[in-house]
Image (cartoon, rainbow, N blue to C red):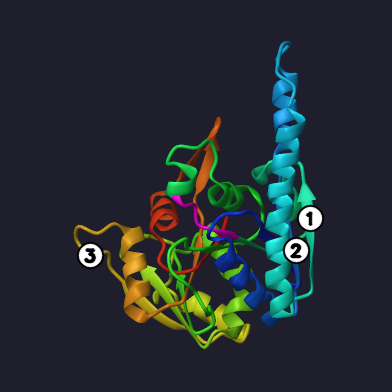
Amino acid sequence: MTYKTILVHADLSPHAASRYALACQVALAHEAHLVGAAFTGLAQDAARNAAFAYGAVLAAVDIESVTAASRQALEHFTTKADAAGVAGERRLSDDDSETGMVLQARYADLLVLSQSDPELTGPDILYKLPEHLALHSGRPVLLVPYAGRYAHIDQHALVAWDGSRAATRAVTDALPLLRRTQRVTLAVFNAQTQYGTHGENPGADIALYLARHGVKVEVTQQHTPVGLDLGNALLSLAADIGADLLVMGAYGHQRWREIVLGGVTRTVLQSMTLPVLMAH
């Protein structure tokens, strides 16, 4: 497996530049085609207005404004991609970001997004794009923290392994990155509490699997410190070993119009301090 089509979300967020930079870096390393996608949300607005007998018609000036903003976002993406020497294209859609990215994800190997910034999105919006795509896109999602700069993700990867389906999916989807990183640490937390999940030597079987794919792995068995939840213990370990990429499964489900995330997934999405590849 390799990445040949990478889809990156394009908008006018102040975090877009670091998102584009990391997407370009991965695209260059894998000789991949990079697609920048921007969304106006006009289709959703039109449908919402049509649902009301006396709904207001979208003003032409509003349509022009949101379309111009999306085009500007794509111009910024193109400038970054051209400067990096990345082959790519740009797409403008009237879908909302959640719907449009899920549809376009079907034809991509990897999605690149920014972590939700609560100062920009607010804490209680209906959907947050990273969570929605991690659970619904069917593709691995590479998330870039909104704070800090991340020049590389190929020095030391930390893999969170608990033997679950989501973790298995994440490890498999991350193979193209793991093959290229200089060092990989696979962490198994609290193996003694996961009866029947691991063999006599927790982490050994998945390490062998990775070795057969050309990935050298160091396995470490960890215990969650008293007073520290698993999500923060994972981020603490990443900081302690100097990891520049975290690979983990995404846990959660849709309940009516709400996304219910697992505790570890929620903590990492809120508090990530390094790029994270998630898969569901």
The magenta-colored residue range is 113-117
Residue occupied by mark 3 = 225
Q: In the rendered view, does 23 fall on the left or right side of 63?
A: left
Q: Is residue 27 above or below residue 265?
A: below
Q: Residue at x 22, y 65 (%)?
A: 225
Secondary structure category for the residue under label 3: loop
Q: Position of residue 139 (x, y in %)?
A: 66, 58
Q: Position of residue 138 (x, y in %)?
A: 66, 54
Residue occupied by mark 2 = 35
User: Does the residue at mark 1 contact the one at mark 2 (Cβ under 8 Å)?
Assistant: yes
Query: Which label is found at residue 91?
Result: 1
User: Does the residue at mark 2 contact the one at mark 3 (Cβ under 8 Å)?
Assistant: no
Callout 3 amino acid: Pro
Callout 2 amino acid: Val
C-alpha span from label 2 to label 3: 42 Å
| Quadrant assignment for the N terminus | bottom right
C-alpha span from label 3 to label 1: 46 Å
Q: Position of residue 108 (x, y in %)?
A: 74, 62
